[in-house]
């Protein structure tokens, strides 16, 4: 992939819960191009939120390699993490209470991160107005969050996240609490800002229909990437195809879609056959019968 901005190589994250170790990421490989707008999708516990926390500098991996721009996230100390989050990353959370201060107006909320970054007042005011206009809220500058709809609050949150001109925008279920019309407006706002500033946008969501709104969708399962959906555009910018792929990692591993496994009753092991232009994957019917028979005899005992 050209212009690789984010690179994860054999990334591992292990959490200790009491006396147990929980493996959240199991040798994950992923590359994201600069300026790409993509989504990470999958069920709860699949590892997508863990990856977002690592990319945001909120957590550190246990092993492997993870790079964002010129930053090596594996070896940063706490001070370096703070500087990285301030300079490189903007966050949009699902809960609006995490994004906006209720006693500040929309414009004051957008100006706050710039104030903390010592941006002069005239520049803060000009940039905050520009960002709010970009997300379609130029007429809501002096409204407090409780005077805005849920979708409008999320668009203000996007403007807040972009205040210090980050290179990476991370959005955690940004449309999880709004209707479909507001969701479309939120995605349009992120797209406009990404195109203007060449910001890389990574969205974490349970919603697989997000594929129609982003450049690429990567599906997560059991701490690894499992599928990838690409949208290919014609020369006129119109989408012409949307195609799903399984992901082959550097160790030669891939995850078959669960619906394929269930449909063919694949268990334990499969047969591989190398053909002229493809690899065939077949259920091991003979071996499965032997194992089922042995298990039945064991139960009889």
Image (cartoon, rainbow, N blue to C red):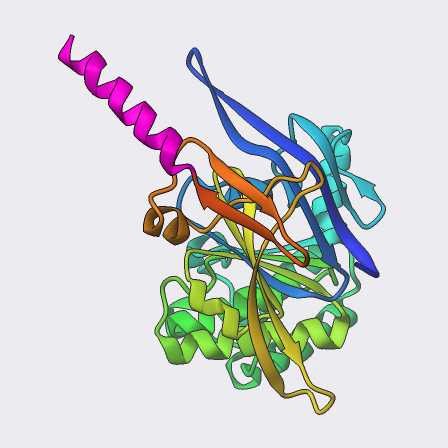
Q: Main secondary structure of the magenta part?
A: helix
Left or right: 75, with 276 as reference point: right
* Front in this rendered view, residue 46 or 150: 46
The percent coordinates of residue 271 (x first, y second) are: 51, 39
* Front in this rendered view, residue 244 or 164: 244
Q: Quadrant of residue 56?
A: top right
Q: Is residue 300 magenta?
A: yes
Q: Quadrant of residue 61?
A: top right
What residue is at 67 percent from the left and 40 percent from the top? Answer: 252
- Which quadrant, please, contains the N terminus? bottom right
Region of the chain picked out in magenta, as a range: 284-301
Determine whether 205 is above or below 289 in the image: below
What residue is at 47 percent from the left and 62 percent from the top? Answer: 174
Determine whether 230 is above or below 228 in the image: below
The percent coordinates of residue 172 (x first, y second) are: 50, 54
What residue is at 37 percent from the left and 76 percent from the top? Answer: 180
Left or right: 189, with 5 as reference point: left
- Answer yes or no: is residue 132 visible: yes
- Which quadrant, please, contains the C terminus? top left
Q: Quadrant of residue 272?
A: top right
- Answer yes or no: is residue 144 visible: no
* Front in this rendered view, residue 244 or 69: 244
């Amino acid at each position: 992939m050209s212009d690789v901005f984010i690179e994860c190589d054999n990334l591992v994250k292990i959490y200790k819960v009491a006396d147990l170790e929980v493996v959240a990421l199991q040798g994950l490989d992923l590359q994201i191009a600069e300026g790409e707008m993509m989504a990470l999708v999958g069920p709860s516990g699949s590892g997508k939120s863990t990856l977002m926390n690592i990319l945001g500098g909120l957590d550190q991996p246990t092993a492997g390699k993870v790079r964002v721009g010129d930053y090596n996230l594996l070896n940063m100390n706490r001070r370096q993490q703070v500087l990285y989050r301030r300079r490189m990353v903007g966050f949009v959370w699902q809960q609006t209470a995490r994004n906006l201060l209720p006693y500040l107006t929309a414009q004051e909320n957008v100006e706050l991160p710039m104030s903390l970054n010592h941006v002069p007042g005239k520049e803060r005011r000009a940039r905050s107005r520009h960002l709010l206009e970009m997300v379609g809220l130029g007429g809501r500058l002096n409204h407090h969050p409780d005077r805005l709809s849920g979708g409008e609050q999320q668009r203000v949150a996007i403007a807040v996240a972009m205040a210090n001109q980050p290179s990476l925008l991370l959005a955690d279920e940004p449309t999880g609490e709004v209707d479909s019309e507001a969701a479309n407006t939120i995605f349009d706002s992120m797209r406009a800002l990404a195109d203007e500033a060449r910001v890389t946008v990574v969205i974490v969501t349970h919603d697989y229909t997000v594929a129609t709104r982003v450049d690429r969708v990567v599906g997560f399962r059991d701490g690894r990437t499992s599928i990838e959906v690409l949208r290919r555009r014609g020369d006129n910018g119109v989408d012409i195809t949307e195609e799903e792929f399984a992901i082959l990692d550097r160790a030669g591993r891939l995850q078959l879609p669960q619906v394929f496994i269930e449909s063919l009753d694949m268990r334990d092991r499969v047969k591989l056959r190398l053909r002229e232009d493809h690899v065939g994957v077949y259920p091991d019917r003979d071996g499965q019968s032997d194992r089922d028979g042995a298990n039945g005899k064991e139960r009889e005992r």
